[in-house]
Amino acid sequence: MYQLDAPIYFYVFAMLPVLWLGYLWISAWKRKAQEQFASSRLMEVLSPERSRLKPLLKLILISLGVSCLILALVNPKIGTQLETVKREGVDIVFAIDVSKSMLAEDIAPNRIEKAKRLVSALLNQLASDRVGIIAYAAQAVPQLPITTDYGAAKMFLQALNTDMLSSQGTAIDAAIDLAATYFDDEDQTNRVIFILSDGEDHSEKAMAAAERAKELGIKIFTFGVGTEKGAPIPIKRNGIVESYKKDENGEVVMTKRNPEVLTSIADVTDGNYTEGNDTQAVLEFVSETLKQMEKKEFEAKKFVSYKDRFQPFLIAGFLLLLIEILLFETQTKWVLRMNLFNENKKD
C-alpha cells in the first residue's frame, strides 16, 4: 500500500517538455550558425575534441535529476507495518441545540458558542470513546457519524450555527430518535447521548422519545446553557446588533434556560442534568461518569504505518545533477580509444 503526500507537484513535470523543446531549438540555431561560419569538416578540424553526444547526455541527466527531485517533493509513502488496534470505550452522541434562542448572550460569548466550546473541551479529554454529532432545531440533522476521529469531530463542531436550519423550534424528540440510529447493535457498547441546550420550547414528544431511548439501553445526559434570568435574542448584521427578536405584540422576547425540561428527559433514562455554564464542573462530572461505565471492545481496526520514501529520490536527483555539472562537452579520451563506433577509421 502507498500514498502520495503532495501529488500536486506532478504538475512540475510539465517543464520537462519545455526543456527538451528549448534544447532542440538551441541545437538547430547553433547548427545553422556554424554552417554560416564554416563547413562541418572544417569545424571538426577546428574543434577535434567536440563531442556530439555529450550535450544530449547532459540533457538526459538534467531531465532525470529534475524528475527525481519532483518525485521527492511528491513524497511517496509506503505502508510497511500493519498494526491491529483494539479499542474499548463508550459510544457518545452529542446533540446540540442550534435554535435561535441559542444566540442569547446571557453566557459569554453566547449560548451556542458556549455549547461548542464545552463539547470541544470534552473531546480533548476523551481517549478511545467513539463520538457522533447531531444538530437540531425544529428538526434533527446528522453532522458526524460515530467515529474515533476527534479531529474531524472538532471540524464539524465548528461548522455548527443557528442558520443551518431554516425552520425553528426545538425538536429534541427527533434528535433523540436520530441519535439512537447512530449506535451499532452488533457492538453492544454502552450508549450515551449528551444533549446541550437551553431547554426552551421543547416538544411534548421529548419524554416519549426518552422512553424509547431507555428501551434501547441508551442513557441521556443533559447540559443546560444560559441563565434562568434569561436574555433577549439579538439580530445581527456583520457582527453588529441591529435589534432584538420580538413577538407578535412587538415585545422583545426573553429566552430563559429551562432546567426542569432537561432534568425530566435525563431522569427517564437514569441519566443526569448538569448546568453547562461551568466548564470545569462538566468536565469533572463527565470524566467520573465515564469511568464508572463498563468499557467494551467495539472495534479492532488495522492501521497502516506509512513511512516517507522521498530520500532515495532526493539523493538520486542531486547525484544526477552533480554528474551533469562535472560532465564536460568534450570527448572522453578512454571512450575515444575504445573506438566503439569506428570513429577513428582513416580514409
Image (cartoon, grey):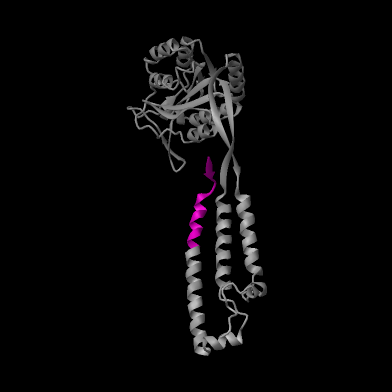
Foreground: 263 or 289? 289
Placement of 120 over or under 28, stated as above or below: above
Residue 213, can we see it? yes
> At 53% across and 40% down in the image, what residue appears?
1
Foreground: 294 or 239? 294
> At 53% across and 42% down in the image, what residue appears?
2
Left or right of residue 165, residue 193 in this image: right
Placement of 52 over or under 61, stated as above or below: below
Left or right of residue 220, residue 247 in this image: left
Residue 62 x/y as whole percent: 57, 65
Placement of 153 over or under 290, stated as above or below: below
From this viewpoint, which residue is outermost toward the left?
A: 248
Q: Is the magenta stretch mostly helix, strand or loop?
A: helix
Residue 30 x/y as whole percent: 52, 81
> At 57% across and 14% down in the image, what residue appears?
294
Residue 162 x/y as whole percent: 42, 32
> Is residue 298 covered in magenta?
no
Placement of 299 over or under 309, stated as above or below: above
Figure disc tally: 0
Quadrant holding the C terminus: bottom right
Residue 229, can we see it? no
> Is residue 5 covered in magenta?
yes
What are the residue bounds of the magenta stretch?
1-15
Foreground: 159 or 69? 69
